[in-house]
Image (cartoon, rainbow, N blue to C red):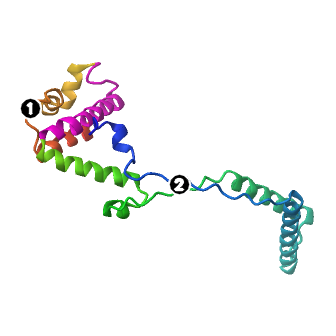
Amino acid sequence: MSDGGLDELFSARDEPVEEAPEPVAKERSRALMILRNALLVIAATVVTVAGLRAGGLRISVPLVVVFFIGLRLVLFAVSEVAPPPLPKRRAAGSAASREAGNDSLRLAVRRWERNLDRAHADAEVYTRNVLPVLAELTDERLRLRHGITRQSDPRRARELLGDPLWAALHDPGRRHPRSRELEAYVDTLERL
C-alpha cells in the first residue's frame, strides 16, 4: 500500500498502456498531391460557377478559385494539427475495467470506493490511505478558496474547517469515523 496521495488518486496504473504502433506513412509524391488538389479546386470551381450561372448569378471565376484554394489550405492546416490517436489499453480482465473502458476518472473513483470500503473495516487502512488524501484535499481547497493552508494560518484554517474536521485531520490516532462523519467532512470541504 502507498500513502494514498493525489498522484495515486488520479493515476491509472490498473490498466497498462500499450504503445501504439507507428503509423505507416504513405509515400506520396509532392507532384501527385498538388495535382490532386488542383483537380479538386478545378472541379469545385466548375460546379460552383455552373450552379451560380444556372441560377442567374454571375461571379468572378478567379474569386471562386481563390476561395477554393483557401479552403483547401485551411483543410490541410487542420489535418496537420490533428490530435494524435489515443493509446490503446490492454484489458486487465476485471469486470470493473471492462465496464469502465478508457475512462480514467471512473477507474480512479472505483479504486477510491474500494479503499473506502476497506477503510470501514480496517482503521489502519483509513489512517494510511484516506486521511492523508483528505488532508491534501483540505489544504488544496483552503489554498484555492482562501489563500492559506493549515500550516500557514492554523487559527484561520481551524475557524473555516470547524472543530470536527480539524480534529479528524490532526488526531490520526482517534477512532476512525463513521460514514455519516465522512459525509460531514466532505460537505465541509465543499462549502469552503
Query: What residue lies at 84% left-to-right and 64% top-to-bottom?
Result: 37
Residue found 19% across the figure and 26% down from its top: 159
Which is more toward the observer, 25 or 40?
25
Q: Quadrant of the N terminus?
A: top left
Q: Nearer the viewer, mark 1 or mark 2?
A: 2
Is residue 82 placed above or below 172 in the rendered structure?
below
Q: Main secondary structure of the magenta part?
A: helix
Indicate whether residue 21 is drawn in magenta: no
In x, y percent, where is residue 83? Answer: 61, 52
Q: Residue furthest left?
A: 175
Within-10-Å neighbours for mark 2: few <14, some 14–19, many 20+? few
Q: Position of residue 68 (x, y in %)?
A: 82, 62
Relative depth, front residue between 178 and 192? 178
Which span of residues is magenta-colored? Answer: 123-152
| Amino acid type for the residue under numbered disc 1 | Arg
Q: Position of residue 165 (x, y in %)?
A: 16, 33
Magenta-colored stretch includes residue 151: yes
Question: Helix, strand or loop at disc 2?
Answer: loop
> What residue would you read off at disc 1?
174
Q: Could you tell me how far apart the alpha carbons at marks 1 and 2 are, in whole angstroms?
A: 45 Å
Residue occupying image coordinates x 86% and y 72%: 43
Instruction: Tell me the amino acid under the disc marked 2.
Output: Pro
Label 2: which residue?
Answer: 87
